[in-house]
């Protein structure tokens, strides 16, 4: 009976070590989004470069589109920006920016320095739309189909691999 008392803590330790080992091998960029396969949340936001004009999510229905969440204060956004420019250049789908918790002057300066790949960049100064989309942090990128359904979410910067193996093929499929 005494020997069983020592096996219980050992068994608990092995179970916890197993969970830790599995957790350490997970990719944090592959957090499943509960919004995949669901309608993109509605919004009505002012344009960064024309604050008197607004775009609504419903204005985008009927076409495949990309929503790239970015901010001027975000170092990984700067890192991914050339790939967002490349994606927009390919014209597979319009790329819209969601400028997240930023100031208009800083955001405008960012785009003037690095180039503006966006069909339009929308201002989400208080982050409410980002919260509706389940944004964990910037950058994040969403692909939305013609019916307004979120089909893909990239957490963190777009990488060359994600662009070529996931984003471009999905955009071609959705437009095909």
Image: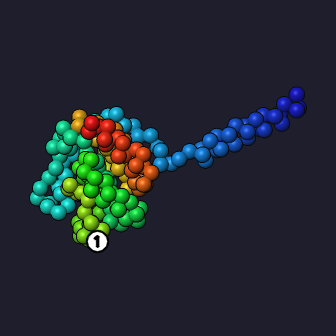
> The N terminus is located in which quarter?
top right
Q: Total marks drawn?
A: 1
For the residue pair 125 and 122, the one nearer the viewer reads as: 122
Q: Is residue 140 left or right of residue 21?
A: left
Residue 127 position in % (x across, y down)? 30, 54
For the residue pair 76 and 117, the one nearer the viewer reads as: 117
Q: How is the image coloured?
A: rainbow
Tell me what residue is drawn at x 88 percent, y 32 percent: 3
Q: Residue furthest right?
A: 2
For label 1, count other residues whose C-alpha is less than 10 Å away and answer few (under 14), some (14-19) or many (20+). few
Q: Residue furthest top?
A: 1
Does the image show residue 127? no
Tell me what residue is drawn at x 32 percent, y 65 percent: 72
Does the image show residue 48? yes
Image vertical order of residue 62 relative to residue 159, above or below? above
Residue 117: quadrant of the picture = bottom left
> The C terminus is located in which quarter?
top left
Residue 111: quadrant of the picture = bottom left
Residue 28 position in % (x across, y down)? 51, 48
Residue 47 position in % (x across, y down)? 18, 57
Image vertical order of residue 75 relative to residue 28, above or below? below
Residue position marked by numbered label 1 in the rendering: 113
Q: Secondary structure at mark 1?
A: helix
Residue 50: quadrant of the picture = bottom left
């Amino acid at each position: 009976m005494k020997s069983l008392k020592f096996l219980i803590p050992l068994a608990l330790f092995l179970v916890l070590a197993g969970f830790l080992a599995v957790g350490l091998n997970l990719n944090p960029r592959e957090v499943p989004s509960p919004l995949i396969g669901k309608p993109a949340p509605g919004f009505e936001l002012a344009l960064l470069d024309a604050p008197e004009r607004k775009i609504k999510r419903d204005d985008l229905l009927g076409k495949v589109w990309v929503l790239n969440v970015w901010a001027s204060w975000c170092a990984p956004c700067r890192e991914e920006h050339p790939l967002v420019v490349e994606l927009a250049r390919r014209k597979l789908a319009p790329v819209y920016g969601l400028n997240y918790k930023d100031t208009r002057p800083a955001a405008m300066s960012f785009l003037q320095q690095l180039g503006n790949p966006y069909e339009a960049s929308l201002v989400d100064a208080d982050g409410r739309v980002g919260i509706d989309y389940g944004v964990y942090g910037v950058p994040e990128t969403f692909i939305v189909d013609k019916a307004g359904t979120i089909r893909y979410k990239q957490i963190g910067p777009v990488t060359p691999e994600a662009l070529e193996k996931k984003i471009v093929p999905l955009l071609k499929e959705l437009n095909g």
